[in-house]
Image (cartoon, helix red, strand yellow):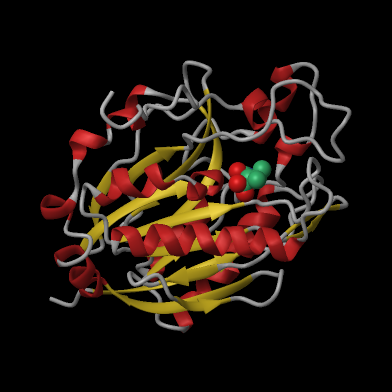
Amino acid sequence: MSRIVTVAAAQLGPIQRADSRGQVVARMIALMEAAAAQGADFIVYPELALTTFFPRWYHEDRAAADHWFESRMPGPETQPLFDKAKQLGMAMSFGYAELTPEGRHFNSSILVDRSGRIAGKYRKVHLPGHVELDPERTHQHLEKRYFEPGDLGFPVWEFEGGLVGMAICNDRRWPETYRVMGLQGVELVVLGYNTPSANSQSPNETTADRLFHHRLSVQAGAYQNSTWVVAVAKAGDEDGHHLFGGTLIAAPDGKIVGELDHEEDGVLVHACDLDETRFGKATIFDFARHRRVEHYGLITERTGVGAPLGKPEGA
Ligand code: CDV
C-alpha cells in the first residue's frame, strides 16, 4: 500500500470582518477543487479559517464575540464544505472557533476523513496574547480573552494510512508540541496560523524576522521529530491589519520542499512520502535509544524559569 499522502496546503487570503461564512466556504470549496485538480487527497486550511482573525477585536461583553463561534460542526454554513470533500473523496483539516454545548470556547481544528466523518479534534494549547484591552498595543491579540486553553493534549491519529497530528499557530513555536506527537510516532503534522506581520511590542522586528522565526520553528519541529509538517497561513490585509503568508511544507529532514510566495488564496501541493520519516526515526532521533528522560524532569515540573540547578564542582 502506498504511503504517499498528496497534501494541499490551502492558504486563504484575507477575510474581512464583514465577510460571511458562506463567502468564505465558497472560497474554500474553490481551493478544494484546485487541490483535487492537482491530485491532492488531503487539504489543509488555516487556523480560524471561517472568519476574520477576530481576536484582534475587543468586545467588552465577552458574549458579544460568540457570533464568531461554531456551535455545530458541520453546521448549515459549513455543510457544503463537507459535501464537496465527500464528493471529491478529499480528506481535510481546518480551524474554527468552537462553542461547546456547555458554553466553553476553544480555538479548535479537526481532521475529516474522505467519507466526511470527523476523525479527530484538537484544541489549541498555547494561547498567545492577553485578556484585557491593552491600549499600548497597535493591535489587540485577545485569544486569552475569548478561548480557554485546549484540554485534549496533542493526540495523533491513524489517518490516511499514516500517523497524523494537529497544532494551531502559536503551538508551532513550542518544541513540546512536536515532541509529544513525536513520542506517538507522528509522521505528518498539519497546522494553520494567523500571524500578524508586525509585533506591536517590538517595533524593530521586521516581517522578514517574523517569517524567519516561523520557518525556524516549523523546520526544527520537522527535523527533530522526523516528521512532515504542513503549515498553512491566513494571509494579507484584514481590516487594515496585515498577516504574513509563508505557507510551507517541511520534510522530515527539516528542509522546505515548497512555499507560497503570495498572500492570496492558493494551494501548495506536495506528495508527502510518509516512509521518508523512517530514516530519522531509526537513527539520530530514535527516541527509545537516545532520549534520557531522567534528565528532563524540569520540563514538566516547572512552567516558568526557576533557580539554576548548578552547584560548584565537588560541593
Ligand atoms: N494566532 C497566533 O497564535 N498568532 C501568534 C502571534 C500572536 C505571535 C503566532 O504565534 O503566530
Residue 86 seen in the figure: no
Name above or below for residue 34 compared with residue 22: below
Q: Residue at horizontal 20%, vertical 38%? A: 293
Q: Position of residue 259 (x, y in %)?
A: 56, 76
Task: Pick the residue in front: 281 or 267.
Answer: 281
Name the quadrant of the N terminus: bottom left
Name above or below for residue 58 compared with residue 1: above
Q: Position of residue 57 (x, y in %)?
A: 79, 34
Name the quadrant of the C terminus: top left
Task: Pick the residue in front: 266 or 18.
Answer: 266
Question: Which quadrant contains ligand 1?
Answer: top right
Q: Farthest front residue?
A: 314
Q: Is residue 134 left or right of residue 213?
A: right
Name above or below for residue 131 compared with residue 68: above
Q: Position of residue 242 (x, y in %)?
A: 80, 56
Residue 198 seen in the figure: yes
